[in-house]
Amino acid sequence: MKRKSGGYVITSTLGEEVKAFVPNDLPPEPSIEINQSTKELLEKALKQIELLNLASQMVPNVEWFIYGFVRKEAVVSSQIEGTQATLIDLLSHEDEKIQTPDVKEVCNYLNAIYLAIDEIKSKKGIPLSLRLIKNMHKVLMEGVRGANKNPGEFRSSQNWIGGTRPGNARFVPPPPKEMNSCLDKLEKYLYAEDEIHPLIRSGIVHAQFETIHPFLDGNGRLGRLLITLLLQHWNLLKSPLLYLSLYFKRYRDEYYNKLNTVRIDGDWESWIIYYLEGVITIANEATEAAKKIFQIIERDRKKIISFSKSTVPAIRLMELLPNHPVVEISKVTSLLKVTKPTAIKAVSQLTNLEILIESTARKRDRKFMYKDYVDVLNSETDLKS
């Protein structure tokens, strides 16, 4: 269905006049057409989300899953923006004081995710709002490229997407004045009554946020994270386990093209189909990954407990590995609050049982990885994918 999704205003930027796009208010008018095939996609997506919710409830500790899925999202979403760090890089250097710029960027995104999760979960925290998004942006941009682009503040100048200047850009978002009005209306839409199903609404809000592009940098990462926060906000997800960045990375050209068709042709229907297909795919993959993680952890717990020479520190270390899958002796000493010889013995026992493997070839500060667990998460997080 053809519809007008917004209009253009003439603005002057860098000495030239350009047409900036100002999106219409949500919900789209006329209403999005939900035909039978889209209804079937929606039902399938909701079923996959429910299976993911069930998988998270069937384990002793949902943090086993949250730890890994959040970190995979931080890596993949940052890679879409050009960051070269991998999941192994993050797990190996996350706790180090001195980090490469790329690892620092991923860690910032990770911190922004946890900030949002903690605020929304807390009874006294900040609800999903423009204020929370600005706080997340401040954390995201701290001490990395983009740190000079007003961290934590909506832009007060014109930006553009693609091209070397607004005049040859692929897309020019609304000017600051119109942008602020669009953001205020978007925030109200998050809490407004709407006949559109919340899952579809989450896709609509993501597209609107990317079109508004309210920051000078970091819009893509925050917009993708916004999806997960919306799914919790509308009670579709019980835990923050579903992240679509991997799907958008896998089909990156289609992702950008579908967003553009919304702006150019008002074709929300094609975007929603693409979005629901992404939810189905990633929710299914996340469920299967959760099952594998659970099986691996349960297998290895039984392995260490049944080992006749296992020590209490080794068993305790096994329990901590899902949240610390890459460790070194000094870290084990700190985690277990034991002496260095005791930590060495615990690591040695897990290494002999092939639960841990040494991931460095150096004599000092050796790192040990819970490889089977990491391998489940590592799919499509290297720089070749």
Image (cartoon, rainbow, N blue to C red):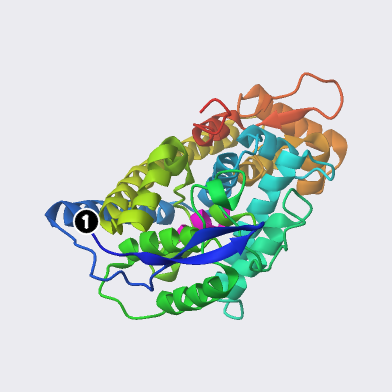
10 Å crowding of disc 1: few (<14), some (14-19), many (20+): some
Q: Which residues are magenta?
A: 221-227
Residue shown at the point (71%, 35%) measured from the top left: 92
Residue tagged 1 = 43
The percent coordinates of residue 219 (x first, y second) are: 57, 56
Looking at the rendered image, the quarter that the N terminus falls into is bottom left
What is the magenta segment's predominant secondary structure? helix
Vertical side of 238 occupied by 331: above or below: above
The three-letter amino acid code for the residue at tag 1 is Glu
Vertical side of 178 occupied by 378: above or below: above
Residue 308 on the magenta span: no
Residue shown at the point (82%, 20%) measured from the top left: 362
Question: Residue 214, can we see it?
Answer: no
Q: Is residue 193 left or right of residue 242?
A: left
Secondary structure category for the residue under label 1: helix
The percent coordinates of residue 175 (x first, y second) are: 56, 67
The percent coordinates of residue 302 (x first, y second) are: 52, 36
Q: Is residue 181 left or right of residue 263?
A: right
In the image as oriented, which residue stretches furthest toward the left?
A: 36
State which quadrant residue 264 falls in.
bottom left
Q: Which residue is nearer to you in this view: 362 or 73?
A: 73
Question: Residue 197, can we see it?
Answer: yes
Residue shown at the point (37%, 80%) measured from the top left: 192
Residue shown at the point (43%, 74%) measured from the top left: 190
State which quadrant residue 135 falls in.
bottom right
Q: Is residue 310 left or right of residue 194?
A: right
Residue 226 on the magenta span: yes
Q: Which residue is nearer to you in this view: 255 or 16?
A: 16
Q: How many marks?
A: 1
Q: Is residue 130 left or right of residue 334?
A: left
The percent coordinates of residue 147 (x first, y second) are: 76, 55
Q: Which residue is nearer to you in this view: 354 or 247?
A: 247
